[in-house]
Image: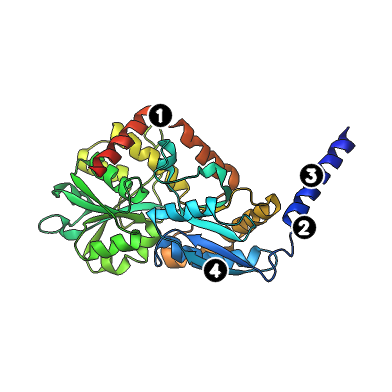
Amino acid sequence: MRTETFRTFVAAIFAGCLTTGVSAQTDNFYQGKTLTILVGLEPGGTSDLFARSFSQYLKKYIPGSPNIVVQNMPGGAGLVATNFLAEKAKNDGLTVLWGPWDPLAQALGSSGGYRVRYEKLEYVGGTGDVRVNYARTDTVPGGMKKAADIVKAGTVTIGESNATAISGLMARLALDTLGVKNKLILGYRGGADVFLAVQRSELQFHNTSITTFRSRSASFIKSGEGLGINYFVPVDEKGNFERNKYITEMPAFPDLYKEVHGQMPSGATWDALNWLTNQVGELTFIAFAPPETPAPLVALLRNAYEKASLDADFAADSVKQYGLPYSFVGPDRGSAIIKSLASVSPEVLDTLKKTIDNAQR
């Protein structure tokens, strides 16, 4: 019986390889070929810069050492590129999407323009980063001297591409939790576009990654025009959280809240913010291949992504450039996070819906 089962398994693998034209080993598949990495945002942002630097390490661990090209496909904070991957990209192992994801659109059960669910895509690998808020120091009359001064502001302006995009939503929920009035302005093309608007004083407040804060925004902060407000950490049901030893230029959000209000944050808005922090804090960026990409190629790409993520030189470069290493999120954990979107509490979803609806009015 075991022998027959094994034969059936081998036959299935062989048939699949004949169909796709890919050998069972796939060792030479990428030799002389080009792997395209789609980035759904404008050039110059965190996703774009990461994809370009990380691709050199990825190439190192893909048998055949293919040429790797990064192609920007901006629109809807990744929406256009995600739909393209699902509907038009060939599932031949030569196209991968890399960048931030939008767990909210899926958790709400509304497409928000997305025509594919994340679990239908082939998960290749994930990368964790830390989200932070920063603001123009002149957001407060007389200038902010410390992060807690943000509560002295009037109505704070925030920019984003669409109402469900993570950066705008985290910024709004943080300010709402602190009790600071805010207004979301939509239509920006991505983080780089928002940053330019902050520099021009069109906007006052922005949510981004710590790596972008320390790279693209570094001179803006050093000049005194901007100030780090907080970084986000997941908080458990007992109120416990772990401060990030790599971040000292701004407080963790719970510490900021305690400085302002004298206690830990609580309430429906805080619960929604903390849920979102748990989602995108651990799994900030994801690499996907098109649906039904041959399993041997997905396995090969997953292996290369993991080895590149754990490469000692890559970690050293990350610490040198950004002051902290990126974390790796494997297929099992990443898939579990994506599946958990189907079981979000009704209270959290209701708060998120209200926040989005208010932004669209």
Q: In this view, does 219 lie to the left or right of 67?
A: left
Q: Do the residues bearing badges 4 and 3 touch, measured as CB atoms within 8 Å?
A: no
Instruction: Provide the residue designation for mark 2.
Output: 23
Badge nearest the viewer, 1 or 4: 4
What amino acid is found at the position of numbered circle 4 in the picture? Val
* Secondary structure type for disc 2: loop
Callout 2 crowding tier (Cα within 10 Å): few <14, some 14–19, many ≥20: some
Callout 1 crowding tier (Cα within 10 Å): few <14, some 14–19, many ≥20: few
Gap between marks 4 and 3, in whole Å?
A: 33 Å
Callout 3 crowding tier (Cα within 10 Å): few <14, some 14–19, many ≥20: few
Q: Do the residues bearing badges 2 and 3 touch, measured as CB atoms within 8 Å?
A: no
Instruction: Provide the residue designation for mark 3.
Output: 12
Answer with mark 2 or mark 1, whichever residue precedes in sequence.
2
Which of the numbered marks, if any, corresponds to residue 243? none
Badge nearest the viewer, 2 or 1: 2
Question: Looking at the rendering, which quadrant does residue 119 occupy?
Answer: top right
Instruction: Provide the residue designation for mark 1.
Output: 345
From this viewpoint, is residue 234 visible?
A: no
Answer with mark 2 or mark 4, whichever residue precedes in sequence.
2
* Secondary structure type for disc 1: loop
* Secondary structure type for disc 3: helix
What amino acid is found at the position of numbered circle 3 in the picture? Ala
In the rendered image, the residue lying farthest to the front is 88
Badge nearest the viewer, 1 or 3: 3
Answer with mark 1 or mark 3, whichever residue precedes in sequence.
3
Gap between marks 1 and 4, in whole Å?
A: 41 Å
